[in-house]
Image (tube, grey):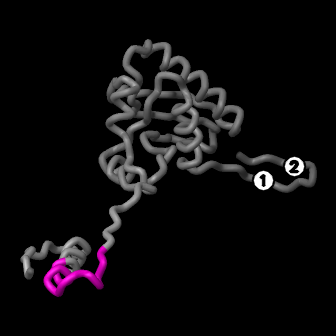
Amino acid sequence: MTQENNSSVATVLTYDDDVLAKIAGNTVRDVDGVLSLEGNLIDSVTDRFSDETNPSTGVKVDLDNDDKEVKLAMDAVLEYGKCIPTVFNKITTKLTQTITEMTDLKPTEIKIHVKELQTRDEYMKNNQKKDKSEKKKIILFDTKRADRGQLFNFHFYIARTCSKRPLPMRNYE
């Protein structure tokens, strides 16, 4: 977008696809009845190993900065029991409003592909991530009271559990 300011300076404002994908992703995730937006296989694998959900996952953007228009397509998991057309209308209304308010772009097309329906309980159960603050098992071993066999077995156990390759376990007592 080119504008003329009072000081006769030409200015240009353009948007990256990722910016609009982030706006759309955050907006849609807040709509009642939307459980998540799903991306492709690579996005799914990456998301499993990260702590945070990427807001642009599952959002495809076709942006025309010259005409100030944007087309959006999303793959969504919706909540079972909700009226799908009603959820779709909420999504389109909220997306259109948010994108128009935050940018100078006009959404010309919004496509939602319903990838799956799940109850909220199913979704929560299937997408639980392990808590990283989970306490690890601590092994206490009294080396002064242990005989040589027990001490060797303990060190061997530690080496075996910390090693990348499995070691055979032997009993040296």
Label 1 secondary element:
strand
Task: Answer above or below: position of 147 versus 38.
Answer: below
From the top left corner, tell me how far across and down residue 79 is, in percent.
41, 22
In the picture, the disc for residue 165 is none
Q: Residue at x 59, y 29 (%)?
A: 95
Residue identified by numbered label 2 = 5
The disc labelled 2 sits on which kind of residue? Asn
Q: Position of residue 3 (x, y in %)?
A: 79, 46
| Of 123 and 37, the residue lying toward us | 123
Please state the extent of the stretch shown in magenta in the rendering: 141-153
Going from N to C along the chain, the mark reached first, 2 or 1, is: 2
Circle 1 sits on which residue?
Answer: 11
The answer to whether mark 2 and mark 1 are in CB contact below 8 A is: yes
Q: In which quarter of the image is residue 103?
A: top right
Inspect the image, locate mark 1, and give the three-letter code of the amino acid beneath it: Thr
Closest to the observer, 173 or 72: 173
> Residue at left 63%, top 32%?
106
Residue located at (28% from left, 83% from top): 143
**Residue 57 covered by magenta stretch:** no
Q: Is residue 23 left or right of residue 133?
A: right
Residue ranking furthest to the bottom: 148
Indicate whether residue 149 is drawn in magenta: yes
The x, y position of residue 61, in whole percent, is: 49, 41
Which secondary structure, mark 2? Answer: loop
Q: Mark 2 Cα within 10 Å, few/some/many (few <14, many 20+)?
A: few
How far across and down, in percent of the image, does residue 144 sit?
29, 85
Disc 2 to disc 1, how far (Cα)?
Answer: 8 Å
